[in-house]
Image (tube, rainbow, N blue to C red):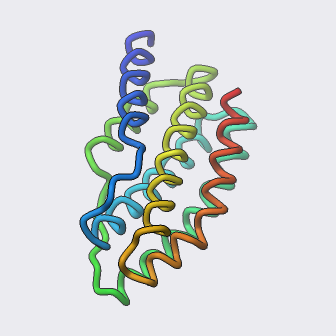
């Protein structure tokens, strides 16, 4: 268990260092990252529903609802813009889910909250970048509309982690 927490901490630290918005090469890059983010959040929410305490489950329910909605909207826009959506999580998010699946009880809840803070921070940075610098108006507008919800998630994740 301790080794799992150490690996998880290292993994989360790696996410933290990669959260700054770097100009994306294309609309496809934004769609890829946003879709993976939504899928990861939905997977995390399901895991918290199974393993989390009441606070984690409540946060997960909100995340699930909001990310299902944003995922549907992203799918619609991607289709209109003729952009492909990734079919699965990337290796980084798959590994993080595997680490979280090894945890239970308080260790799970603490790790879930910590991961939420980091992934919400990453999502806010991604969407802010697209809203400010995106080249496709429908994606830029989507990012602008989604940002308030993501900022709310980040605030709630920080509260959950405290």
Query: Where's the N terminus, which quadrant?
Result: top left
Left-right relation of 140 to 48: left
Nearer to me, 16 or 66: 16
Above or below residue 94? Residue 64 is: below
Q: Which corner quadrant holds the C terminus?
A: top right
Question: From this viewpoint, which residue is outermost toward the top?
Answer: 2
Q: Quadrant of residue 146?
A: bottom right
Q: Where residue 159 sits: x, y (%)?
A: 73, 35
Q: Residue at x 64, y 34 (%)?
A: 52
Q: Which residue is found at the position 57% from the left and 20% from the top?
A: 107
As displayed, is residue 47 above or below residue 101? below
The residue at 52%/79% (across/down) is 141
Residue 98, percent from left and from top: 37, 34
The percent position of residue 44, horizontal first and vertical second, equals 51, 45
Residue that appears at 45% across and 31% down: 100
| Residue 64 vertical position relative to residue 105 in the rendered view, above or below | below
Return the residue nearer the eye: 109 or 140. 140
Q: Quadrant of residue 35?
A: bottom left
Compared across the picture, whether 91 is left or right of 131 comes to left
Q: Nearer the viewer, residue 106 or 146?
A: 146
């Amino acid at each position: 268990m301790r080794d799992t927490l150490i690996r998880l901490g290292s993994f989360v630290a790696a996410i933290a260092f990669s959260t700054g918005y770097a100009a994306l090469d294309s609309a496809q890059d934004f769609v890829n990252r946003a879709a993976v983010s939504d899928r990861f959040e939905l997977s995390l929410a399901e895991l918290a529903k199974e393993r989390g305490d009441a606070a984690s489950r409540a946060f997960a329910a909100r995340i699930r609802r909001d990310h299902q909605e944003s995922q549907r909207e992203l799918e619609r826009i991607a289709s209109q813009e003729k952009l492909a959506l990734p079919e699965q999580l990337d290796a980084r998010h798959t590994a993080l889910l595997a680490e979280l699946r090894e945890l239970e009880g308080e260790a799970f809840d603490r790790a879930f909250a910590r991961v939420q803070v980091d992934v919400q921070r990453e999502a806010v940075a991604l969407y802010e970048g697209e809203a400010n610098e995106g080249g496709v108006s429908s994606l830029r507008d989507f990012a602008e509309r989604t940002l308030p919800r993501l900022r709310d998630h980040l605030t709630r994740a920080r509260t959950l982690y405290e």
